[in-house]
Structure formats: structure tokens, C-alpha cells
Amino acid sequence: MKPKAFLSYRHNLAPEIAGKEALIQAIEADQTLDLVFDKSVTEIGDSVTAFMEELIAARCVFVFISEDYFKSAYTLFELIAVHQHEEAARKVVLPVCLSEQMISVYDYTAIESYWNTQPLEDEQDPRKVQDVLATLLRTSGRTGGRTLTSAEMLAMIRDAWEAIVFPYLNTLRDSDAAYDVTVLIQKVVEDYAQHAATECEKTTAHHHNLIAEEIGFLLEDHPVIKAELMKVSRPLRRAGSLDNVEFAKRLLSDSGEAARTLGDLTNAARQIRETLGKDSADWRRVFKDIQQLCGCLLLNTIDPVWWFNQELELRRQAAHCVTGSGYQLDHASFVEVVVSKELLSRGEMSSPSFAHDPKGTGGVVPSGGVADYDYNNMMMFDAVNVDAVAHSLLGDIHQDLLRSTQVPKDVDQLIREVKDRAVAIKNASYQRPVYYIVSHDYLQQIRAQPWFSEFETLLKGSLQFICCSQQTLSDNGSATKESQTELLSAVGLLLDLNKD
């Protein structure tokens, strides 16, 4: 996986096409970046706005500046939205001027003059541009459903110009220097490639240290975990004299594979359970922190390049809702990671908790079979009553949090009880929310429910769904450096220790 860079440009004009080809060649020669532009990832039938939203969310955006860039509603929308993104200050926006003439446009007068021109009889009629831009801003949710006036949109364009374009034009080059777009693009690519590599290295080191510190705290609270890990792993036995944090660093890096380390942790946990007794309060306390250590090992598998590409948008999402795909890696401690068993048992349909009514009513009723303790894949429920779907989507979360097999029949009560327990766990866990790792299918299903808006409002800040497998036009790639299937299987074996 490579750091991504998106391109915002007018794709049907000769100078822009030539600039794009020069950018492609520069990035291919560098070999450390991945360039994404509309024609590279979209096909007939794909959503134009979906691609634009991916571009707006991106860490890095090349912007091909020309007079024509400001005559398209779509490129103006991208420029405005990139500028207004809540993480805009941390984005890397790289303007590239395609013509020497454009360099002299310091005062913004040409753009404003075009915007205020009377309607023209051509495809670049400014009134048509304004209509389309107003529609894009409104339908994307950026104006609260309101259609902006021409003056309001012009003010937004001016703000984006002053923040992104003008500083670049004002410091671009020595007036006596020869102007060569290809050389300019090569230099911009070289500089950004170095920046991306440096930031990924910083993320890796910072992330590794934080997770090691958290594991060190867990080992300090429960020395028995460290003792048993030393017994099941010869390399860790040699590291036994190290302090807890240094031991944790060895735990994270010695095998190089989290799935293997999770196996060692499972074997150690099995020995602890035999010593303490599977029904003892001491075992339950230790196992809670073993699960948290498991979560740390999973977090350590996050690909630093994937995180670099996704971080800013994930932070923005996580600040607003329970379905944001992300979490903050720079927290020094993490809540017990409650791994969604819906994902662990994806594709397994044994002993479903609910089934279609055998009487032929078309409804869904509790299954007569003995439900297993894993989430079942409840995605079979199409066109069934809302309450049944709510129970299939939230019932096992209720059971996980409340440790109860009795799930309220009333949906409102079910949501309230999930909320109350999630808040209680957060308050008892240093204000850390409950995390659920869920599949993309699960996320789509729960978002589609009519009660989801209330659920999201109540649970915001207390429960966070993490989905690392959402499909995008530009292909986000795998969030982990290791096979997610192997990792989740290893986690499943560990969790099974508390079921026997």
C-alpha cells in the first residue's frame, strides 16, 4: 500500500490532460505514491459525487489551477469542500499552476468577473455553473438543506481561494526563472513523497510506543499475565528481566505477527484460567484485561500507510456519530475492545436466534433452537418487521453489555438499556467509549433502520462502531498489515475461553 494523492482538475481540457499525464509520469517514476483521479477509478454508472466525497476526505489533493478550474461547478465544489473540511489544517493541498498567465491573477478579479457575467449561450454559462454548484452544496448536506445565493457561494469561493490558491501564487517562483510545468510537477511530487514517508514513520513509532505503554499498565496490574506469557514463549522468557513497557515492546515486535502473539496470549490465558478457576471473580477480572491486551495487539496491526490515508476523515466521522469508521490512535489507553461476534462468525448460520415464523405469518419469531453465544449473520432478514430487525441487530450487543440472555421486546427499551450500560462502561473506563468492530454489511443494515437516528443520538460518544472494510471507488485497501481473517479467528479462540 502507498500513500494516496487525489487530483482535482478539469478533465476534458487539453492543458489539464497534459498536466495529468505529467503528474502520472512523475508519480510512476517516484514509485512511492498512488495517484487517484476520476478516470482512474470510475466507470460508467458510478457516482460522480461519491468520487468527489472521497477526494474531499483525502489526506492529499493536487489542484490543477487554471482559469477554467473556476468555471466548473464540480471543481469549485471540491475546492470549497476541501477548504471547509474539519481537518483542513492537517490536509496537504498542493496547487499546481498549469499556465504562466495564471500566475499574474493575484487579485481574484478575473474569477469574480466571470461569476458575475450575464448568461452566455455556451456550456460554461456562469448561471448554469451557479445552479449546479448550489445543488451540489445543498444535496451534500453542507448547507443544511438550503439553496445558497450567488453572493454566498462567491464568498465561499473567495475564502477557499485566499486560503489555498493565493498563498501558492504569491510565492510560486522567481519572475526571471523559466516556467516548466513538468519540472514543477516533478518537484511537488518529490517533496510530498518525502513528507508522506516521514509522517508514516512518525505514526509507526508513536503508535507503537503508546500501545506498548498501555500493555505495560495491564502487565503491571496483572503480573500473572507476563509470567504465563514467559512460560509459553521462549523469546519472551529471555525478555523476562525487562521492565513491563520494554517487555511489551518485545511482545509487539518479536514474532512480527500478531496472530502468532494472540496464540501465545490464548495459551497463557488458558493456564491462568486453570489456576484461578473459570468461575472465579479473579479470573473474570484478569480476563477483562486480557481482552484489552488483545485489543492492543489488534491495534498494533493497523497499517501505518492506511492510517495516514484515512486518519483525517476518520477523526471527523468519529467526532459526529457512532458509525464513523475510526478511532483515535493517539489515546494513551483503550477501552476493552468488544469484538463483534457478527463479524467473527460471518457466514455461519447455525442456531439463529430468530427465524421466519413457521406459521407463515411473514414475521420473525425467536428460534426454537438453542442459540449459540456468537453473533449470527442476521443479514438474511429482508422485508421483515422493524422490531425483529432491531432485535437481530442490537439484541446481541445488549447481551454482550448487560451479560443477560433476556432482551427487551420493546425496541425503545432495548435501545435505552444499551445506552445506559454503554454510558456506565464509559464512566467506569476513564471516559473511553465501547468499541465494536463490525462488518460493512452490518453497518449498512443498521443505518437503514428508522430508529437509527435516535439510537445514534443516544449512543454518540459512548459506543463506536469500527468498520475497516468499507468499499470505496478508489479502494482503501486492507486496514491491517496481516490477514484480517486470521486475526479474527485468533481473537475468536481467545474469547471462547470465557464461554466453556
Image (cartoon, rainbow, N blue to C red):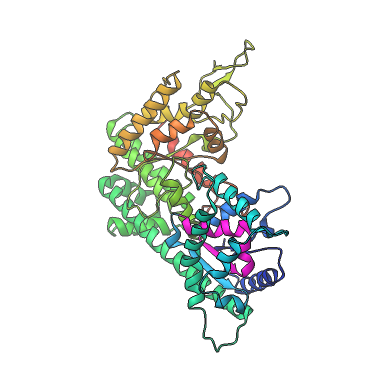
Query: Measured from the top left, where is residue 405 in percent x and y?
Result: 42, 22
Q: Vertical placement of 28 versus 378: above or below?
A: below
Task: Please identify the residue farthest to the left as the structure is shown.
Answer: 221
Query: Measured from the top left, where is residue 392 in percent x and y?
Result: 52, 26
Residues 291 and 299: in front is 299
Residue 105 visible from this viewpoint = yes
Task: Please identify the residue farthest to the front as the structure is shown.
Answer: 118
Query: Measured from the top left, where is residue 241 in percent x and y?
Result: 28, 59
Q: Vertical placement of 173 versus 490: above or below?
A: below
Residues 335 and 20: in front is 20
What quarter of the picture does the N terminus occupy? bottom right
Task: Please identify the residue farthest to the top as the structure is shown.
Answer: 359
Q: Main secondary structure of the magenta part?
A: helix
What quarter of the picture does the C terminus occupy? top left
In this rendering, the count of numbered labels is 0
Q: Residue at x 48, y 28 (%)?
A: 451
Task: State left or right for residue 329 relative to residue 216.
Answer: right
Residue range highlighted in magenta? 59-85
Residues 250 and 66: in front is 66
Snapshot quadrant of residue 32: bottom right
Residues 425 and 95: in front is 95
Task: State left or right for residue 91 relative to residue 462.
Answer: right
Q: Tell whether position 81 is magenta.
A: yes
Q: Vertical placement of 124 versus 463: above or below?
A: below
Q: Residue at x 62, y 12 (%)?
A: 361
Residue 58 visible from this viewpoint = no
Q: Tell whether position 70 is magenta.
A: yes
Snapshot quadrant of residue 281: top left
Query: Measured from the top left, where is residue 410 in percent x and y?
Result: 44, 19
